[in-house]
């Protein structure tokens, strides 16, 4: 069964999920787990023309709850350093080595990065503050020694084999 079929609501369905509270991270270094990856298209801007993009979602577990942070990686040569940094961060690339990007292995990967807050003005003229991923750190197993496992939601009602 296609996982997206379970996402549709009918007009008369019951609903109960309220969503989670937005968790704003204080600036600092945090471990994360990649929970989603989507292929997309960047429409182009003043510095980068239209190109493919990878939209990545990560979760950071804190005492205040789970912070969800989204960011894009533009598939453009002048920004290759950031893509390379991401793949080093999740342990799939080493400094100086050539790597064919395997996007199918990204979800579930863990990494560590520096997060900060970013302020922007929304379409209604309101100032908003969001979490922003500032820089990736190269993967080191010791970052995750005392970490509790993170549960990634499953988008399927299919029976599990146990």
Image (tube, rainbow, N blue to C red):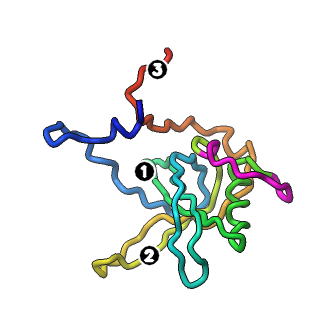
**Residue 159 found in image quarter:** top left
In the foreground, 83 or 100:
100
> Is 69 placed left or right of 29 in the picture?
left
Q: Name the residue under label 2.
A: 119
- As rendered, which of 71 and 12 lies closer to the eye? 12
Q: Which of 57 and 64 is in front in this view?
A: 57
Q: Give the range drawn in magenta.
A: 94-106
Around disc 3, counting alpha carbons within 10 Å, would you say few (fewer than 14), some (14 to 19), or many (20 or more)?
few
The numbered disc on residue 160 is: 3
Q: Decide which of tag 1 and tag 2 comes sooner along the chain.
A: 1
The image position of residue 53, as x and y in percent, is 57, 63
* Lower sequence index among marks 2 and 3: 2
Residue drawn where x is 56% and y is 47% of the image: 34
- Residue 77 position in % (x across, y down): 71, 70
The numbered dot on residue 64 is 1
Question: Quick check: 41 above or below 16?
Answer: below
Residue occupying image coordinates x 49% and y 57% = 69
Q: Is mark 1 on a helix, strand or loop?
A: loop
């Amino acid at each position: 069964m296609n996982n997206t079929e379970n996402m549709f609501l009918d007009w008369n369905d019951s609903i109960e999920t309220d969503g989670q509270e937005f968790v704003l991270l204080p600036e600092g270094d945090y471990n994360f787990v990649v929970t989603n990856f989507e292929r997309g298209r960047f429409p182009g801007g003043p510095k980068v023309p239209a190109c493919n993009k990878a939209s990545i979602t990560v979760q950071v577990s804190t005492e205040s709850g789970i912070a969800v942070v989204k960011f894009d990686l533009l598939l453009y040569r002048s920004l290759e350093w950031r893509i390379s940094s991401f793949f080093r961060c999740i342990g799939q690339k080493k400094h100086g080595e050539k790597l064919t990007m395997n996007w199918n292995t990204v979800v579930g990967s863990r990494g560590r990065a520096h997060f900060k807050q970013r302020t922007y003005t929304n379409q209604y003229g309101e100032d908003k503050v969001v979490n922003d991923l500032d820089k990736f750190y190269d993967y080191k197993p010791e970052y995750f020694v005392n970490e509790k496992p993170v549960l990634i939601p499953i988008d399927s009602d299919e029976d599990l084999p146990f």
